[in-house]
Amino acid sequence: MRTVIKAAASYRGMVGFVVNILQRLIVKQAWKQPRVWEGFIKCCKSTAPQSYAVVLQLPTAQLTSFLESAPELRDPLLLHVENFSRSQRAHVQASTMAVLYSEDELAAAKRLQEMTDKDKDKDREDSRESPSASAEEEDAAPPGE
């Protein structure tokens, strides 16, 4: 891991290669070896934001451990996920979202999403009703005005 960290620090053009190595370390369960896990976390820090996709693939327990070791990455990672399209966000596990948000933030985010969806539905209904509503107003207006 030391070589990978040095390479990422010295040659920014190798970030894609380093992120590929991080991806492979998830498959090999790097968290089972404490020194490798420390290096994984350091490497993710140094290659952020390119490493966010890799971090999101961690199992829930390891993501929690990762964010305890690197709390400064929680907000940028959360912002990264929030910038996903709806279809991209659908591929992020609910348990991952629960780890990224605290329980209060998760409930607030769900309420916000529901309110946004309701507003969109209301806007759609209003746009469908608006031509007929303006015709009714014209009929109700007294002549000569």
Image (cartoon, rainbow, N blue to C red):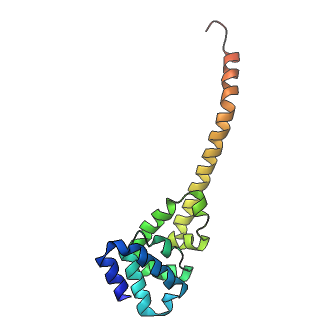
Question: Is the residue 4 above or below the residue 113 in the image?
Answer: below
Numbered label tally: 0
Residue 98 position within the rendered picture, expressed as x and y whole percent measured from the top left? 56, 71
Residue at 55% across, 84% down: 27
Quadrant housing residue 144: top right
Residue at 61% across, 67% down: 91
Residue 46 position within the rendered picture, expressed as x and y whole percent measured from the top left? 35, 76
Left or right of 34? Residue 112 is right
Question: Is the residue 119 above or below the residue 143 in the image?
Answer: below
Residue at 64% across, 35% down: 127
Q: Nearer the viewer, residue 51 or 137?
A: 51
Q: Nearer the viewer, residue 128 or 44?
A: 44
Q: Nearer the viewer, residue 32 or 71?
A: 32
Left or right of 9? Residue 76 is right
Residue 34 position within the rendered picture, expressed as x and y whole percent measured from the top left? 44, 92
In which quadrant of the rendered image does the C terminus lie? top right
Left or right of 83? Residue 120 is right
Residue 121 position within the rendered picture, expressed as x and y whole percent measured from the top left? 65, 45
Residue 47 visible at all: no
Residue at 51% across, 64% down: 81
The residue at the far left in this view is 10
Question: Is the residue 13 above or below the residue 31 in the image?
Answer: above
In which quadrant of the rendered image does the N terminus lie? bottom left
Residue 22 visible at all: yes
Left or right of 38? Residue 119 is right
